[in-house]
Image (spheres, helix red, strand yellow):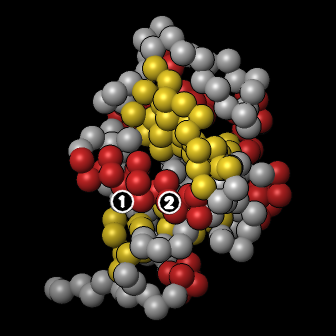
Amino acid sequence: MLTVKPRFETFEEYLSYNDDSEQLYELFNGELIEMPPESGFNVEIANFLLLKLASLVGHRRVRGHGLELEVRGEPKNRYPDLTIIREEHIQQLSKRNTIRLSMPPPLLVVKVVSPGDIQRDRDYIAKRMQYQDCDIPEYWIVDPQTQTILILELKGNSYAEVGSFSNDDLLLSSGFRELKLKVSEVFGKE
């Protein structure tokens, strides 16, 4: 039997869609694109950062991979590996774990880069532009291949590189100054 994939004219139509699965989709040109599962190592890194950041801001303000961000451009939505939300988001996200463009942006998004050139370009270029456009104050790109963490901070309308950190460097985050974390810890080297 041939199944017809749904098409969506608006993001609101997409938000009302429910296929009764746990599958995550990006909405690209009106079509649903299934998001593949993350690698075990990427999940391990994201979980480690989730625990560290939750100890600073509280568990209710840290969201893992299931948080959806509405963005401009294509696709219309993204799923960061880790997001620090604002206090007011907690109630707003109680029914659907989606931050809309009409809402204040989250404070931080973290992406753990998946292997492959296409994924690297998407995480370093496309997502950077979309998150910058959403006025997200900080974007961290955690790269298991190079064992580096690039921290970007919104300055005016564009991201400025705080730095690319590696080895025993301490992460320098203006939004989370109390975080005392070495890059080597993030990648399980300590």
Residue at the far bottom in the pictured view: 9
Residue 102 screen position, x and y as percent: 71, 74
| Marking on residue 129 | 2
**On screen, residue 27 above or below 111:** below
> Residue at (82%, 51%) from the top-left corner?
87
Residue at mark 1: 35
Distance of label 1 from label 2 (alpha carbons): 20 Å
- What residue type is disc 2 on? Met
Residue 82 screen position, x and y as percent: 56, 44
- Secondary structure of the residue carrying tag 1 is loop
**On screen, residue 79 above or below 70:** above
> Residue at (54%, 15%) from the top-left corner?
169
Residue 30 screen position, x and y as percent: 39, 84
- Secondary structure of the residue carrying tag 2 is helix
Residue at the far top in the pictured view: 190
> Residue at (36%, 59%) from the top-left corner?
35
User: The N terminus appears in which quarter of the rendering?
Assistant: bottom left
Choose the circle earlier in sequence order: 1 or 2: 1
